[in-house]
Amino acid sequence: MSPAERLRDLLDSRGETWPGPIEHHEAIGSTSDRAKELERAGAPEWSAVLAERQTAGRGRLGRTWESPAGNLFLSVVLRPRLPPERLTLLPLAAGVAVAEAVDEQGVTAQLKWPNDVLVGSRKLGGILAEGLSGSRGTHAVVLGVGVNVRLDASRLAPETAAGATSLDAETGRPGDVIAVAAAVLARLRARCHDLAAADGAARTADAWRARALPWWGREVVAREGDQVIRGVARDIDARGGLLVETAGGVVRALLSGEVFEVRAP
Ligand code: BT5
């Protein structure tokens, strides 16, 4: 049975018959680049691309996602029919889905705004949400998910390895990439469905908060574009923006960028 067939079978047995085509590649540049190509060619929503390894895996802001074999590299074409203020919650919903999928493997992950999936202070996975003006006149999003499943840390740059973890390192068991893919896809559909519900924004924000690093009230440095903002992390807002209270009590809502905790020396 091919990996794509096995993935479909696993989804079927979860009662989650997959509505789109699933492509599997032994090696590819980036599953998200391939998913964008498919989107442009008019591929249906929920088209999924899976690869055993990537040769040009991408993180956010031009960074690299190191992608040796044995790990999950998955991208999905979405055409969410959501108002703009709710669309910004999609990466957070995806983070919740990945954390839930990882839970199934017996690993408790925490989410760091906007898109890191961490165990302790180490990165288990990441999410890359890229918006496109869709080929069908709608807005499309390609959601890329990377999760370290069976990670040979010697295949990573030393500075990446120092901050990375994997399911096998956390559980002491060799992980099954296709089973993790099935869990991520099933959870992702459920979370996207939830996000579209009447109270979806609040539900998604609550689900994200429940799995977020407990940073609230702590001092952070955030970066949004060229701007550096120092303050106290307060919460996320209804759009998934990070609320940082700066000097003088002014609360800023960041919609993109990244944030670091300022640790006492
Ligand atoms: C992310 O970026 O965390 C989003 C990663 C998304 C990867 C998926 S894989 C499938 C799909 N196809 C793609 O081409 N991409 C998506 P960011 O927040 O920018 O984090 C990148 C940083 O994480 C790097 O600068 C490294 O420090 C670190 N890093 C890189 N590879 C890693 C790995 N395998 N495990 C843990 N950390 C890693």
Image (cartoon, rainbow, N blue to C red):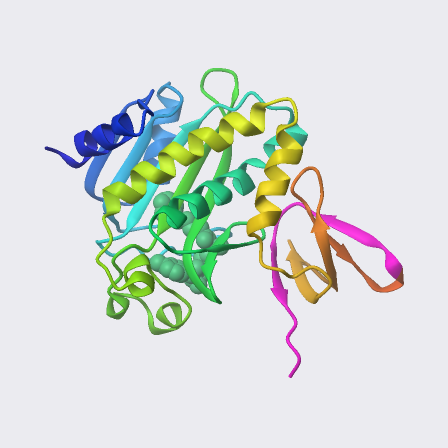
Task: Find the residue positioned furthest to the bottom.
Answer: 265
Find residue 161 and report its image quarter.
bottom left
Residue 170 shown left or right of residue 112 in the figure: left
Q: Is residue 179 above or below residue 151?
A: above
Residue 259 shown left or right of residue 243 in the figure: left
Task: Find the residue positioned furthest to the left.
Answer: 1
Rendering coords of residue 176 (x, y %): 23, 48
Q: Nearer the viewer, residue 40 or 119?
A: 119
Residue range highlighted in magenta: 249-265
Rendering coords of residue 153 (x, y %): 28, 68
Q: Residue at x 46, y 59 (%)?
A: 118
Visible residue check, residue 15: yes
Specify the quadrant that holds the C terminus.
Answer: bottom right
Specify the quadrant that holds the N terminus.
Answer: top left
Residue 137 shown left or right of residue 145 in the figure: right
Rendering coords of residue 234 (x, y %): 74, 55
Q: Residue at x 66, y 60 (%)?
A: 222
Q: Nearer the viewer, residue 159 or 177?
A: 177
Q: Residue at x 55, y 42 (%)?
A: 92
Q: Is residue 138 above or below residue 9?
A: above
Q: Residue at x 44, y 37 (%)?
A: 143
Rendering coords of residue 54 (x, y %): 27, 49
Q: Is residue 148 above or below residue 195?
A: below
Q: Nearer the viewer, residue 165 or 30?
A: 165
If the picture is divided into quarters, which one holds ligand 1? bottom left
